[in-house]
Each structure stands twice: as C-alpha cells, then as structure tokens.
Amino acid sequence: MRINPKIALVVLAAVVSTSAYASSYTWNLVPGTSGAIGTTSSVMSNTGNISLAFSGYTTATSDVTASSTWLSGTWSAAALYAMNGGTDNMGYGINAMTNHEITPTSVIAVDVSGLVANQGIKSLQVLVDNVNTAAGETYKIWGSSSIGGTLTLLYTGTQNNVTVNIPGFAGYKYISIAAAGISNSSVLLQSLTASTVASPEPGTFALGLLAGAGLLSRTLVKRYKKRKA
C-alpha cells in the first residue's frame, strides 16, 4: 500500500495541535502554611485569572447511601482547612473532621457552572491526596444542581495522588468530593484542572503520536529503498 507522506504529516500534526492549542487552568489548593479558613474559599486559577469557589459542608450519616444518589437535606456549612503537611498530605479538608480532612460525612463542593458557560470547558480533572488505599480508603465525586439537593455519583476514585477525569460534570452546577471506602476514611482535595478540549482516554494521545510517526517513517523508508535500487 502506498502511503502519501503529506497525509502522514497531517495525521501527526493533527494529534500534536489538539494539545498545543488547548487552554488549561489549574486551581492549586496547597497553602504555604496549614490552618483553618472560612466556609468558602475563592481560589484563582494559575492562568487566566478565573476564580472558583470551594465550600465545605458536613452532613448526617443517614444521608450517605450505598446507591448512586446521596440525600443531602441535612447539609450544614463547615469551615475548610488548608493543609500543607508534606508529601501525600496536602490540600483542602474540613476543619472539624478527622485530621482536618474530608470524611464520608463531609464534602467540599465546587461551583463549576461558569466554566462550561463562560470558558468553554470540555474536561475537568481532580487530584485527591492522602488516600490510604492499603487500608481501603477511596473517594467519591458527586454532581448536583444545588447545595442541599440530591447528588448523583459521577466517579469513584481508588488511587492516591493521581489526576482523574470527572465524567458528566457539565450537566451539573456543583461538583462535590467526599471520602469513602471505610467509615474512618479521610482525604484531601489538592487541585482541580479544567481544559477547553476533551481529555483523551489514557494512552490515546501517545498512540496518536506513534501512529502519525509510524506512517511518516514507513513512507521515508520506502523512498530510501527506491532510491538505493
């Protein structure tokens, strides 16, 4: 099969340009020093000067269910805690909870409605820290249209300090993070990242680069052999 080198270059360029022209914004929640802060903290993105509000809440144990919804009628505003305890112990938690962290009966809610409407955000990622996976700790990410309304489960995280995509976030005004897995789980929300392009599945970008490079190299090798002949 004859491969046109121009097509190979177009494939490679398309993969690279998709990433190159994307706008990305990160809200870093690691403070200089640890300490309690208010019930809501407005944080600016590292680029673009976009402000997001991170708010703390506690709820009753009876609200937390094993199903894909969370009845949140008893939510109460709670002071946040900004933690900088070194590696694997950094980010926002809830001041009154165990180790000043997010527990199964507390959440940090983020109003993301403006990201989709005003910034054209297509993907949203979160980094959760201090997840003791060996002990059975996990965390859950929920979506809701209001504070105090029913939450819908969007994602269950089972890894520590790993950036993950939040599926379906664009359908909700609020994204909330809570600890899960075992009754005494406690985690920290370290950062949130938004991008104007949809995040590819793991390895898709690398595979795209390999495919484009493979097409191009195959074409060049064939040309070289023809010239030698």
Image (cartoon, rainbow, N blue to C red):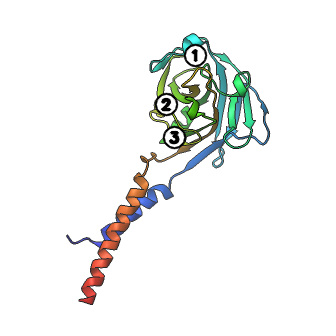
**Residue to which mark 3 is pinned:** 164
Residue 206 in the image: state x and y as whole percent: 43, 57
Question: Which numbered dot is residue 28?
Answer: none
Q: Nearer the viewer, residue 114 or 162?
A: 162
Residue 42, image x, y percentages: 70, 34
Could you tell me if the residues under marks 1 and 3 are in contact, i.e. CB atoms within 8 Å?
Answer: no
Q: Which residue is mark 2?
A: 156
In this rendering, would 4 be left or right of 60? left
How many angstroms separate mark 3 from mark 2 (CA)?
A: 10 Å
User: How far is the residue under mark 2 from the one under mark 1?
Assistant: 21 Å
**Figure quadrant of the C terminus:** bottom left
Residue in the picture at 27% in, 78% down: 222
Q: Mark 2 falls on what kind of element?
A: strand
Residue named by callout 1: 148
Q: Earlier in the sequence, mark 3 or mark 2?
A: 2
| 43 lies above or below 57 | below
Q: Does dot 3 land on a helix, a strand or a loop?
A: strand
Look at 71% across and 41% down and name the residue there. Answer: 30
Q: Position of residue 184 (x, y in %)?
A: 62, 22
| Residue appearing at x 73%, y 21% in the figure | 96
